[in-house]
Image (cartoon, rainbow, N blue to C red):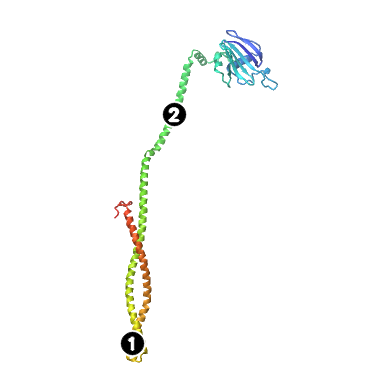
Amino acid sequence: MIKKAIVSNIQSHKNTEMFFTPGINCIIGSSDNGKSAFLRALFWGIKNRPIGIDNLASHWARNEKGKLIDDISVEIHNDKGELKRLRNSTTNAYTLRKKESKEPRILEAVKTDVPDEVEAFFNLSETNIQHQQDAPFLLSASSADVARFFNRIVRLDIIDRVLGNAENMRRKNKQELEAVTKQYTSLLEQDEKLNWIEDINKYIEKLESVENRLSVYLKYKEDIEDGIHRIEELKDVRACAARVHKATDIIKNIEELSVQIAADKNKYNKMNADICDYKQSATITKKTKNCKKAMELVLKIDTMEKGIDPLHRAYTKLNQSIVEYSYETNEKKKAMQIVKDQKKELPKECPLCGNAIK
């Protein structure tokens, strides 16, 4: 129990010391003599309430500007030792000295919390402290509140707390179960929408196989297109060869004509010489028949000479064609060799239709 209390610089108490006796202690006095202020000081030392000191610090502890210049404190003695609650401009702490300890221990007051050692030093609950404006103890309380109070005394409140905690846990688990069930339903719906993912590996393998085959077919296609291009070139070579064969026949005819023209030209030259002789001869009349024959021959030769020039031009052109044909023939041989080499590289089966290549 509390044996003595000393209040300093709190409201109307500059330095008040009060002693308590075992049993019930009553503080009696007229109004405004500091009864309530003394109780506030005790409550501040025991429960750290109120937190601020604006309404606690007396005018003796303040200067003209209202700044705190002196300590405000509550010192309480009981069977366990001494406890002092101190507050000034730099310090906010408890000083605790137990009977078995020679030196006091300083405990810092942190915001609204009371150090555990201070709680254990007083061992007081809300039942042990009643404020001035509080209703009479248990007389105005409801039957349920009175029952709860006595349950706490005999420790039956543990059952209430356990049941309350169990109920809270049940509600919490129910809410979590509903949330998990809802999430599970949502996941099932998403899973149904994503069933196609299980078969995607098969589709990927098929796609890779098709891509590989496509790359092979594209290479075949390029080879076939190259072969087709070379075949078209060979067709042009064959067409040129056909023209060369025709030109060879013409050249042969021209050569035969050339031989005949050369023979006819020799005859012409000889007849021309004879005509000159006829013109100079005095016996022209005797050779009238021969002259007539010579004139016919001259006309024939003139006609032949008129046809020689186009034939000569054709002959020259054909000689040029023969030279070109010789070059194209060499190119044809090279192209045919390329075709043979390309045929050796062709596959045995057509990549497009699958039939054997003949």
275 in relation to 12, above or below: below
As measured in the structure, the alpha-carbon distance from the residue carrying label 1 to the one carrying label 2 is 139 Å
**Lateral position of residue 92 relative to residue 284, left or right:** right
Quarter of the rendering containing residue 270: bottom left
Quarter of the rendering containing residue 294: bottom left
Residue at left offset 37%, top offset 42%? 204
Q: Nearer the viewer, residue 175 or 79?
A: 79
336 in relation to 38, above or below: below
Residue count near mark 2 (Cα–Cα under 10 Å), binned few <14, some 14–19, many ≥20:
few
Q: Which mark is residue 17?
A: none
Q: Which residue is mark 2?
A: 178
Image x and y of residue 58, in percent: 66, 18
Q: Which mark is residue 292?
A: 1
312 in relation to 299, above or below: above
Q: Residue 326: in sight, yes or no?
A: yes
Q: Amino acid at mark 2?
A: Glu
Image x and y of residue 334, in percent: 35, 60
